Amino acid sequence: MLFNYICPECGKVIPADTPVWRCECGSYLDLDYMPVLDRSRLPEEKSMWRYSQVLPLENINPALSFREGYTPLVPMEFWGVPVLGKLDYLMPSGSFKDRGAALMIHKCHEMGINEIVEDSSGNSACAVAAYCARAGIRANIYMPAGNSSAKSIQARAYGATIHLIGGSRTDCANAAIEGAKKSYYAAHAYNPFFLHGTKTVIYEIAEQMGWSVPDYYFTPVGSGSQLLGVYLGLKEMLNAGIIDKMPKLMAVQSNLCAPLKEFSEGRPLSTPVSQSIAEGIAIARPVRLKQIIEAVKETGGDFVIVDDTEIVEALRLSFAQGFYIEPTSAAAVAAVKQYAGKIRQNESVVVSLTGHGLKASAKIESLV
Ligand SMILES: [Zn+2]
């Protein structure tokens, strides 16, 4: 297919069929690709592959997918604010990361790669391992020791080899880079194909809302693979004339690990001393930090900081309405409380419910 990787730092252009994972200068890569969705050509299929017109793959191989996506968008209410919950925790491996892994592993398969390395705090590991099982690709997953054991069990059950690394997330990423020297580093934080997969969530939401977008979009942010995918999809739909405005992107982080707010205010990035129960967003140095901040600012959004007490309250309110989500997802719900007085009655709000509670039973047990 006629598109390239492009480096946002040094401008280097690399054909997208090259098995590189970052630029020689060290930066992540983006794709020079701006597809236009023709809504009159949408298939009957109600899955993320409904939008294959705007996905950067040569051929879609149905044997590599689970017909995943087109998750429900369901009315909920928090602190008197009506919101729409996007139930991406219902994806095959139990999180929104399946959208990104579906694309990234599809591309690896297309390039003839038969072994990959990934580093993840949990949900990405499960997603990548599931798609590797589907594609017959050997998966080596580097995980920080001490994260939810349910996630490492799930990834191992799919057949992945798990390498538990002590220390910080950065130590884990470094171990993965070392381990990837003999195979391909399918790093979800770097890989732009991953973002082109996660962008399908906003195409679905737009279609579910009658080809419009909400005024606010609340999402937890760790490496930014949800927020940046959404931003990418919004830019494409804006360029295609499908929508005429972007929602305010509300990037939610824990007070125990808040690099976005620190960086956006020109403060030095702190090192987290203890970990929030929202383990999925405990990433002290997101690879795409600057890009996330630009996306939030361009949309008039905000960086919202929540603490564990607020997360637990949001979790309990979600459970009470029948939504069994993990604490990281509840961080996005908790952020709505801080905005309850600012959201006007005629404004629409989507909250991204990113991960399944069944993966976090051990933590939830102590709360209920
Ligand atoms: Zn570069």
Image (tube, rainbow, N blue to C red):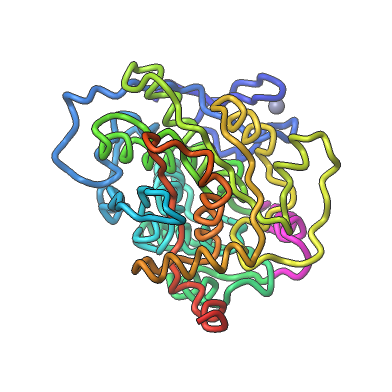
Left or right: 241 with respect to 245? left
Question: In terms of image quadrants, where is residue 262?
Answer: top right
Check the image and name the residue furthest to the right.
268
Residue lying at 30% horizontally and 49% vertically, measured from the top left: 73
Residue drawn at 59 percent across, 56 percent down: 117
Q: Nearer the viewer, residue 72 or 147?
A: 72
Q: Is the magenta stretch mostly helix, strand or loop?
A: helix
Image region (quadrant) for ligand 1: top right
Choose between 285 and 209: the one closer to the eye: 209
Q: Can residue 141 be seen in this view?
A: no
Q: Can residue 274 be seen at all in this image of the molecule?
A: yes
Q: Residue at x 35, y 22 (%)?
A: 243
Magenta part of the chain: 165-181
Indicate whether residue 42 is drawn in magenta. Answer: no
Q: Where is residue 266 in the image (x, y as percent from the top left)?
A: 82, 34
Residue 132 falls left or right of residue 335? left
Residue 77 falls in image quadrant? bottom left
Q: Looking at this view, is 227 or 252 the one in front?
A: 252
Vertical arrangement, residue 199 with respect to residue 359, above or below: above
Left or right: residue 341 compared with residue 71: right
Residue 355 horizontal/vertical position (percent):
46, 61
